[in-house]
Amino acid sequence: MLEVAQSPTASSKKGDRYIFNETGVSNESLTHNLEFLLKVNVKLFASVRKFSRRDNLEINIEEGSIVKDLLSKIGIPQNEPLLVIVNESTQGKETPLQEGDTLCLFPIIAGG
C-alpha cells in the first residue's frame, strides 16, 4: 500500500510530503504533485490475493490512470484473467479511474 506521510529528515523542509511504499521506502517527494494523485480503494478476492500481503488496499495513483495502470502498480500481470468491478459495475482494464473509486478484483474461474 502506498501512503502519503510527513517525513522529517535533515534535508527536508517542514511540511514536505513523501510517498512510502509497503517497505517504508520513500519513492519521491510529492510536495508539488499531491494534487495530481487519486486515492483508489482496491479489494482482492480469492487467488488474486497472492499479489499483495493485504486483502484491502488504498492506492494513490496518478490522475488519468486506467485500471491497467493500477494493476501494474500492484504487481498483477497484464495477462492475468480478472473480473474487474469498479463501484459495483463490471468494467474492463481500460476503464479510467476517478478519485474514491472502489475496485474489486476477482479471478476468472472456468469449470464444467
Image (cartoon, rainbow, N blue to C red):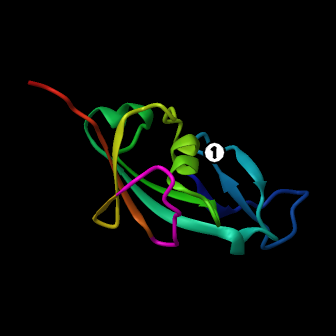
Specify start and end residues of the magenta stretch as a single range: 91-100
Residue depicted at 28% across the width and 43% down the height: 45
Q: Is residue 88 magenta?
A: no
User: Alpha-carbon neighbours of circle 1 within 10 Å: few (<14), some, or many (≥20)?
Assistant: few
Q: Could you say where residue 23 lies in the image, as x and y percent from the top left?
A: 60, 39
Name of the residue lying farthest toward the left: 112
Judge from the rendering whether residue 105 lies leftward or rightward of residue 57; answer left or right.
left
Judge from the rendering whether residue 88 lies leftward or rightward of residue 52; answer left or right.
left
Quadrant housing residue 46: top left
Disc 1 marks a residue whose amino acid type is Gly
Any part of residue 106 in sight: yes
Judge from the rendering whether residue 91 lies leftward or rightward of residue 26; answer left or right.
left
Residue depicted at 87% across the width and 62% down the height: 12
Main secondary structure along the magenta-highlighted residues: loop
Q: Could you say where residue 96 lies in the image, as x and y percent from the top left?
A: 53, 63
Q: Could you say where residue 41 lies in the image, as x and y percent from the top left?
A: 43, 61
Judge from the rendering whether residue 88 lies leftward or rightward of residue 18; answer left or right.
left
Q: What is the count of numbered marks?
A: 1
Name of the residue lying farthest toward the top: 112
Any part of residue 1 in sight: no
Q: Could you say where residue 31 lies in the image, as x and y percent from the top left?
A: 79, 69
- Check the image and report above or below for 26 versus 103: above
Q: Pick whichever, 23 or 103, lies toward us.
A: 103
The residue under label 1 is 24
